[in-house]
Image (cartoon, rainbow, N blue to C red):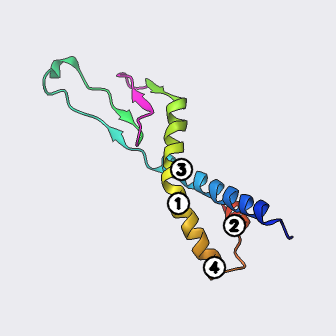
Amino acid sequence: MNLPHSLDKLVQRGAVGAFTCGLVLTGELLFTIEWSFPKCSAPWDGPSPAVFGAPIPYERWGGSSSEYVFIPRVYLLNVALLMVVVFPFVRGSCKLMAMRWPQLTYRGLAIAL
């Protein structure tokens, strides 16, 4: 299928974007960073709340065993920031793979994920 050059570029960027989004969401699901700190100045106040997520914390432990506060807007902002960081590396890797193996297309990468 022959697409016009501008449409082909748009499809390539969309495929790389979908692949990047999948990588970032998988990374967020598998690797969560916990930010916690001890209350050295007042240990009698109880445990300090831990927050989860990187680079911006999007979930907070509320103090009891099953109480968590999740902020979806901050989570989406966190995913967007990580996509901005990861996208150039994924795009460069995809270009190298496409030059090395011409039969492997960007559409195939998006479908593979």
Residue type marked 4: Met
Residue 106: mark in rendering: 2
Badge 2 density bin: few <14, some 14–19, many ≥20, Cα 10 Å: many
- Nearer to me, 57 or 1: 1
Quadrant holding the N terminus: bottom right
Q: Where is residue 35 in the image (x, y as percent from the top left)?
A: 32, 37
Position of residue 51 in the picture relative to residue 94 (left or right): left
| Residue, disc 1 | 88
Residue 28 position in % (x across, y down)? 49, 47
**Quarter holding residue 38:** top left
**Residue at x-position 33% and y-position 31%:** 50
Q: How far apart are marks 3 and 1 (CA)?
A: 9 Å
Front label number (3 vs 1): 1
Q: Does the magenta stretch include residue 60?
A: yes
Disc 3 vs disc 1: Cβ atoms closer than 8 Å?
A: no
Mark 3 and mark 4 in contact? Answer it, CB < 8 Å: no
Q: Earlier in the sequence, mark 2 or mark 4?
A: 4
Q: Mark 3: which secondary structure?
A: helix
Up/down of 67 relative to 14, above or below? above
User: What is the CA distance from the residue labelled 3 to the residue labelled 4?
Assistant: 24 Å
Magenta residues, dominant SS class: loop
**Residue segment shown in magenta:** 55-66
Q: What residue would you read off at disc 3?
A: 83
The residue tagged 4 is: 99
